[in-house]
């Protein structure tokens, strides 16, 4: 096996392991239990959040835990906290995709963003979409627009549905007839 083939093989293995982690693989059983309990106790804010914190103490950087927090804060209307989690997810997605650390520096050539079946680039795109949406909801329309424009640059066929966010921000201030 050539050095290039060995490196490509190792990269494919690492990508598969990261994709598995994004889907919940590698999550300690006790952390999974706390995520499950957080979902079951969603209607009890303090109890659900405590379970999320327990999961985080067991698996602090696991995507499943971050996504659990994101969803909890988002659906509870705690958008500023959801935005902080979205920023953590963006950093994680950048590292796992071997992208520049700031989303503004990411280029379409950095990953196969056009392959919707490729979970790691898709994780980055959906995370950036969540970030853009939250920026808009929190009144940061310029930042939200820039993030959406970056999404459309990376995903020109708009598989993640970013165009609808651009349409929304474009309509801000216009009278609805």
Image (cartoon, rainbow, N blue to C red):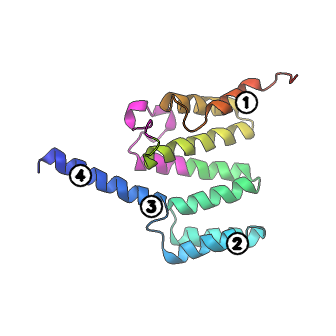
- Distance between the alpha carbons at the discs numbered 1 and 3: 34 Å
Image mark for residue 40:
2
Residue position for label 4: 9
> Is residue 79 shown in magenta?
no
Quadrant in the rendering for residue 50: bottom right
Instruction: State the residue at coordinates (30%, 51%).
Output: 12
Indicate the position of residue 29 as horizontal and vertical percent values. 50, 76
Image marks 1 and 2: residues in contact by CB distance under 8 Å: no
- Distance between the alpha carbons at the discs numbered 1 and 2: 34 Å
> Is residue 114 shown in magenta?
yes
Indicate the position of residue 18 as horizontal and vertical percent values. 40, 56
Label 2: state its secondary structure.
helix
Tell me if 36 is positioned left or right of 114 in this view. right
4 or 1: tag closer to the N-terminus:
4
Q: Residues within 10 Å of mark 4 (few under 14, many from 20)?
A: few
Instruction: State the residue at coordinates (43%, 31%).
Output: 107
- Distance between the alpha carbons at the discs numbered 2 and 4: 41 Å
Residue position for label 1: 168
Q: Which residues are magenta?
A: 89-115
3 or 4: tag closer to the N-terminus:
4
1 or 3: tag closer to the N-terminus:
3
Image mark for residue 21:
3
Label 3: state its secondary structure.
helix
In this view, which residue lies farthest toward the left? 1
- Distance between the alpha carbons at the discs numbered 3 and 2: 23 Å
Tell me if 92 is positioned left or right of 36 in this view. left
């Amino acid at each position: 096996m050539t050095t290039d083939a060995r490196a490509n093989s190792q990269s494919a293995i690492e990508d598969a392991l990261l994709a598995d982690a994004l889907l919940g693989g590698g999550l300690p059983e006790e952390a999974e239990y706390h995520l499950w309990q957080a979902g079951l106790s969603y209607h009890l804010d303090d109890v659900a959040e405590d379970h999320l914190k327990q999961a985080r103490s067991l698996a602090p950087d696991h995507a499943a835990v971050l996504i659990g927090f994101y969803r909890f804060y988002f659906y509870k209307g705690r958008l500023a906290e959801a935005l902080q989690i979205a920023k953590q997810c963006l950093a994680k997605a950048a590292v796992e995709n071997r992208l520049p650390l700031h989303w503004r520096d990411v280029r379409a050539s950095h990953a196969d963003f056009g392959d919707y079946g490729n979970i790691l680039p898709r994780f980055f795109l959906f995370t950036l979409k969540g970030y853009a949406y939250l920026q808009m909801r929190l009144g940061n329309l310029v930042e939200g627009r820039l993030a959406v424009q970056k999404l459309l640059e990376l995903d020109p066929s708009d598989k993640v549905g970013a165009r609808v966010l651009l349409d929304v921000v474009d309509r801000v201030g216009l009278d609805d007839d």
